[in-house]
Amino acid sequence: MGDPPEPCAPRDRGGPRGPGDPCYAHPRLAAVYDALDADRRDLGAYLRTAREFGAHRVLDIGCGTGVLALLLAARGADVTGVDPAGASLDVARAKPGAGRVRWIHGDAADVPPVPAFDLATMTGNAAQGVVAPEAWARTLHGAHAALRPGGRLVLETRDPARRAWEEWTPELTRRVTRVPGAGEVESWQELVAVRADLVTFRSTYVFAADGAVLTSESTLRFRGRDEVAADLAAHGFTTQEVRGAPDRPGREFVFVARRP
């Protein structure tokens, strides 16, 4: 799917990642995450979606280091970001403008129902990284509870038919990134296993400054279009539209689901 993946990134141009990944929780990896994933053109579609629906109150589920949340807040939105990785939230809270966003350490079910949100987003691998069925159900239930009637959940997930994992190899993903304050970081990924709709991969990071080597093993669930639509319906959503990702046409499903 698209260009070769980059370590610990939330989309195919950047690579596979999930909310439970060590790259979210490890302070050293969280600190270099933004530099390893500097190209965030994918977020433009979410900014346009917020404007399209006139969303003032936005919940960013799986907000990570807060890039989208801060972009929305800078445009005047009332934003809450929630993420299970404390190290990533620490990075988000230290950024300029972070005081405009409410940060919650947890998942969608930990978000207070008030204020009721106009829009909830799950960008990149946030949806695919919720692997266990009970955790996925909790996430959808939490998103539904957080939205006002008429509010929308927008999430993306890769089309399994495109078999993105076939490009997650050391040969295609190896790269060296110069990170301000950390020096050069060499990184690559390798596929570990494919079991039905579960794909496990390992990311490796080598810090030139001190030779430290860190690894992160992660699993993503590749749900088909019909499965996602059925799961949304089971949790009270109406699928309004299934779009493509503008920067990755034909490779992902972008669900726009409405709480009636």
Image: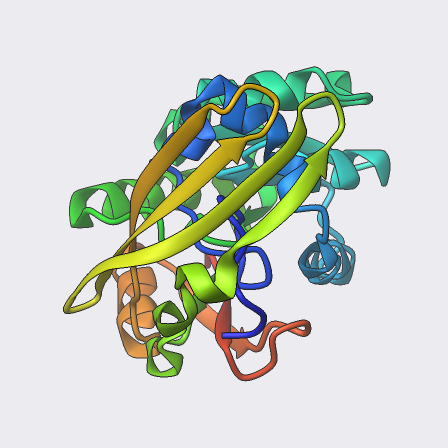
In-front residue for pair 129/227: 129
Give how far across and how far down residue 231 sits, in percent.
27, 62
Give how far across and how far down residue 244 sits, in percent.
57, 77
> Compared with residue 103, is residue 120 higher up or lower down, i.e. above or below?
below
In-front residue for pair 233/188: 188
For the point 33% across and 76% down, which residue is it? 160
Looking at the image, residue 65 sits to the left or right of residue 112; the answer is right
Task: Write down the quadrant of residue 3 in the picture.
Answer: bottom right
Q: Which residue lies furthest to the right in this view?
A: 75
**How many numbered marks have been drawn onto this rendered protein structure?**
0
Give how far across and how far down residue 146 sits, in percent.
47, 37
Q: How is the image coloured?
A: rainbow
Task: Write down the quadrant of residue 47 in the picture.
Answer: bottom right
In-front residue for pair 134/32: 32
Q: Can residue 256 be seen in this view?
A: no
Q: Is residue 29 visible?
A: yes
For the point 49% across and 66% down, which residue is it? 172
Q: Which residue lies furthest to the left in this view?
A: 195
> Compared with residue 9, is residue 146 higher up or lower down, i.e. above or below?
above
In-front residue for pair 215/160: 215
Looking at the image, residue 65 sits to the left or right of residue 101; the answer is left
> Compared with residue 20, is residue 112 higher up or lower down, i.e. above or below?
above
For the point 53% across and 66% down, which residue is it? 4
Task: Write down the quadrant of residue 220 in the picture.
Answer: bottom left
Give how far across and how far down residue 229 sits, in percent.
34, 71
For the point 53% across and 48% down, which residue is it? 9
